[in-house]
């Protein structure tokens, strides 16, 4: 009954569009409703009662509406016959040419729709033309064309909409804000285009402008949206034209105008459908291809899974499996066989070369097998082999004694397809013997490590530089490539005091207050560390890794007798070391303990040596050390022919200062003067406490005139408001240090006559006043 109601409305609307109440109707949506009606009903019901009911309903509606609108009896009957034949033929052709339960999904079905529509409309038009002629109004070609195009456009516009609604084809609405906005924009453009063409610029030939909106919708959105939009566009076009607006209103002849309108809406409907279903067809094809690809991938994955499973089964057994073809060429090794031989099966290798290539020996492990003795060859010749022993003896690897059993593989027709040989390992007993030998070897290694520790301890205790001896011993004990010793510098840092296997000028320095790296952590915690893969450790220091080339590393704290950590010994391997043997770790710990004693002894000796060469009060070199340095500088000046100047400085009125302020103040004056004078000197200059309040100064590379400037700077910074007097003498080739110092002493004596001055003397005893200072 729903279709009957729709047909009634459609017929009524069609009759309302009749021009001047007597001409042909501008639109005939009833053709589309009837085509959809009969298509659905004929596909869902085969009972003749239902078919006759459809015929009666269409007849009743056609008669009632046409009679009500003034149509004559002949015309009414003709219209009934034309509508029924047109709808029946369309439904029959559609049912014959493609599945009735499927909505419009592709270009082939669109072609079927167009063909069925054309054929049905041609029959309906022919019947209608005859009826009109019988009624006494012979139609011209324009009326015939109008009848055909209005029905053709009605089916193309209405039938797809109804079929998609009845068959409940899902609508693919835009997903996402952007797509929804695009649909809204497309619809808005369509509305604006038609409003502009039919009302805003009324009368101009701009009917082509809405075409862009139709193409936009058809290429981008669901077919249901496209056909509904097409129906709305056609309705708008017809209404605008009937109201006398739009580009078609300018056509003066009514029939021609109607024909143009029908052709326009029919063309837009066909274009929209063609673009939309073409897009749907491509999308469907892509989906099918994707599904086919997914199925192929699943099948391939299943095949790969089965292959991996078979390989895993072969790989998981501890028996070596060897497969050959009938000619003895190798086809397959499983993992066990591949591991024993060290090679994979080589199908291109001549079977005669198997014994040599795969290291096959007789049971004694030393006699190479001949080609005929190989168990695989025997299997192919004899059909079956068992208890055949041989040894796989790869160079540099332990020999693998195996016992072989094999048989040929025969096809259903009796043809030999190849051979399979299983190799069972016979090394259990020999492995136990190997374990015993390994234990003896470890014991020997332990003894060797202990001996190395003893030798290292002797070397460390007797070495002039025990720190260098410790890092060298650590490298030898651990079999490492490099080592370093880091000790605190008293300023919150660990600095390298000795290295080996690293650049000689490299100085390592780590902040104890910085990140707790492996090195810093070992020092702070007092715990030994070993890291097989330093680069992946979260506490590794990337800078040390890069500088030292560390791959594996060990860090051993150096702890003194009082339990104080005095350093950390770092050992570097540049090749991976998986495990640090316990004996090696114990020996390194013993070496670190010996190192702590050696460092304490060496530091004590260094302090004693330093005290023997330095003044206890000022820290300056003493007279003995100064004499040695003076001789060395004279030799250097003679070699390089560079100037060298000696100076003696004496604090003025020191005895009076001592008597007035006390000896402690005098000591403080001497220390203060030493610091103030040292700040005015270069690193290569030497200041020595010569005795009492006298100081000797050695100035390499300075002439007497240069020395005057230096000495005057020193005189200017004497603390406590005191002054000093200086005597200067430049060394001359061929003179000794004692002669130069004697000349400087004479100059000092002359200067003391006036005090607070600088006097330049000469080994030739030629007096010369200091530059800028008047002789007194």
Image (cartoon, helix red, strand yellow):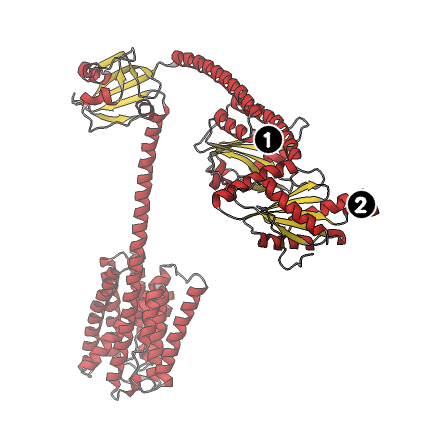
| Residue 68 visible here | no
Residue 286's x, y, as percent? Answer: 30, 54
Disc 1 residue crowd, few under 14, some 14–19, many 20+, Cα 10 Å: many
Please tell me which residue lies in front, 228 or 122: 228
Q: Gap in Å between the C-alphas at discs 2 and 1?
A: 51 Å
Q: Is residue 575 above or below residue 130?
A: above
- Observer-nearest of 685 and 679: 685
Q: Residue at x 46, y 13 (%)?
A: 440
Is the residue 134 above or below the residue 763 in the image? Answer: below
Q: Is residue 671 above or below residue 188?
A: above
Q: Position of residue 716 (x, y in %)?
A: 69, 55
Mark 2, secondary structure of its residue: helix
Residue ID for mark 1: 557
Count up the numbered dots: 2
Which of disc 1 and disc 2 is earlier in sequence? 1
Residue found 50% across the figure and 28% down from its top: 472
Q: Residue at x 55, y 21 (%)?
A: 458
Quadrant in which the N terminus appears = bottom left
553 relative to 357, above or below: below
Residue of label 2: 658
* Residue 422 visible somewhere in the drawing: yes
For residue 109, side relative to residue 766 (left or right): left
* Left or right of 444 on screen, residue 747: right
Give 424 or 706, whichever is nearer the viewer.
706
Quarter of the image for residue 617 reads top right
How crowded pointer 2 is (Cα within 10 Å; few <14, some 14-19, many 20+) is rated as some
Out of 718 and 94, give the one closest to the viewer.
Answer: 718
Q: Does dot 1 land on a helix, a strand or a loop?
A: strand
Residue 330 drawn at (x, y percent):
22, 25
């Amino acid at each position: 009954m729903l279709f009957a109601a729709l047909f009634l409305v459609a017929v009524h609307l069609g009759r309302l569009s009749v021009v001047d109440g007597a001409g042909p109707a501008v639109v005939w949506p009833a053709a589309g409703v009837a085509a959809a009606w009969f298509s659905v009903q004929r596909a869902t019901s085969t009972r003749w009662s239902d078919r006759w009911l459809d015929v009666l309903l269409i007849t009743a509606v056609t008669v009632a509406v046409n009679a009500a609108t003034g149509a004559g009896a002949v015309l009414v009957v003709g219209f009934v016959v034309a509508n029924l034949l047109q709808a029946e033929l369309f439904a029959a052709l559609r049912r014959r040419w493609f599945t009735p339960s499927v909505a419009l999904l592709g270009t082939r079905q669109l072609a079927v729709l167009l063909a069925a529509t054309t054929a049905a409309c041609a029959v309906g038009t022919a019947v209608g033309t005859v009826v009109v002629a019988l009624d006494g109004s012979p139609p011209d070609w324009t009326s015939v064309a109008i009848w055909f195009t209005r029905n053709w456009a009605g089916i193309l516009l209405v039938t797809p909409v109804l079929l998609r609604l009845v068959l409940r084809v899902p609508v693919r609405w835009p997903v996402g804000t952007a797509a929804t906005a695009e649909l809204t924009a497309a619809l808005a453009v369509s509305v604006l285009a038609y409003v502009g063409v039919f009302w805003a610029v009324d009368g101009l030939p701009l009917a082509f402008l809405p075409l862009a909106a139709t193409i936009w919708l058809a290429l981008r959105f669901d077919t249901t949206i496209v056909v509904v939009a097409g129906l709305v566009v056609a309705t708008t076009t017809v209404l605008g034209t009937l109201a006398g607006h739009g580009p078609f209103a300018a056509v003066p002849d009514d029939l021609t105008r109607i024909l143009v309108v029908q052709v326009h809406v029919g063309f837009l409907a066909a274009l929209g459908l063609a673009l939309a279903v073409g897009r749907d067809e491509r999308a469907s094809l892509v989906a099918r291809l994707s599904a086919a690809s997914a199925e192929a991938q699943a099948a391939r994955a299943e095949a790969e899974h089965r292959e991996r499973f078979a390989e895993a089964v072969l790989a998981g057994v501890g028996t070596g499996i060897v497969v050959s073809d009938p000619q003895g060429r190798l086809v397959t090794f499983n993992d066990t066989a591949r591991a024993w031989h060290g090679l994979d099966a080589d199908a291109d290798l001549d079977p005669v070369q198997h014994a040599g290539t795969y290291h096959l020996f007789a049971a004694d492990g030393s006699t190479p097998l001949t080609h005929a003795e190989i168990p695989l060859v025997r299997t192919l010749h004899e059909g079956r082999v068992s208890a055949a022993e041989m040894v796989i003896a790869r160079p540099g690897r332990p020999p693998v004694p195996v016992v072989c059993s094999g048989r040929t593989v025969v096809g259903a027709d009796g043809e030999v397809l190849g051979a399979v040989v299983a190799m069972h390992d016979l090394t259990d007993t020999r492995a136990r013997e190997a374990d015993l030998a390994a234990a003896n070897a470890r014991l020997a290694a332990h003894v060797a490590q202990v001996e190395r520790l003893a030798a290292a301890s002797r070397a460390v205790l007797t070495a002039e530089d025990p720190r260098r001896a410790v890092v060298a011993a650590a490298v030898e004990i651990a079999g490492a490539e490099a080592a370093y010793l880091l000790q605190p510098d008293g300023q919150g840092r660990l600095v390298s005091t000795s290295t080996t296997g690293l650049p000689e000028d490299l100085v390592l320095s780590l902040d104890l207050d910085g990140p707790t790296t492996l090195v810093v952590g070992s020092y702070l915690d007092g715990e030994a560390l070993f890291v097989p893969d330093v680069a992946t450790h979260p506490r590794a220091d990337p800078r040390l890794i890069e500088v030292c080339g560390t791959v594996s590393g060990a860090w051993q704290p150096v702890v003194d007798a009082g339990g104080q950590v005095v350093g950390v010994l770092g050992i570097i391997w540049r090749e991976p070391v998986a495990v640090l043997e316990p004996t090696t770790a114990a020996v390194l710990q013993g070496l670190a303990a010996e190192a702590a004693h050696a460092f304490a002894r060496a530091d004590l000796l260094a302090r004693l040596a330093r005290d023997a060469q330095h003044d206890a009060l000022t820290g300056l070199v003493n007279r003995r050390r100064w004499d040695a340095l003076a001789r060395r500088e004279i030799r250097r000046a003679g070699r390089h022919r560079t100037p060298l100047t000696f100076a003696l400085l004496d604090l003025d009125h020191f005895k009076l200062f001592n008597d007035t302020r006390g000896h402690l103040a005098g000591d403080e004056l001497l220390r203060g003067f030493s610091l103030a004078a040292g700040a005015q000197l270069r690193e290569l200059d030497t200041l020595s406490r010569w005795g009492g309040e006298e100081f000797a100064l050695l100035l390499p590379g300075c002439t007497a005139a240069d020395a005057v400037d230096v000495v005057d700077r020193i005189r200017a910074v004497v603390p406590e408001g005191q002054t000093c007097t200086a005597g200067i003498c430049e060394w001359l080739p061929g003179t000794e240090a004692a002669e130069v110092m004697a000349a400087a002493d004479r100059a000092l004596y002359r200067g003391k006559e006036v005090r607070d001055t600088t006097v330049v003397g000469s080994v030739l005893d030629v007096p010369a006043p200091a530059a800028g200072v008047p002789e007194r």
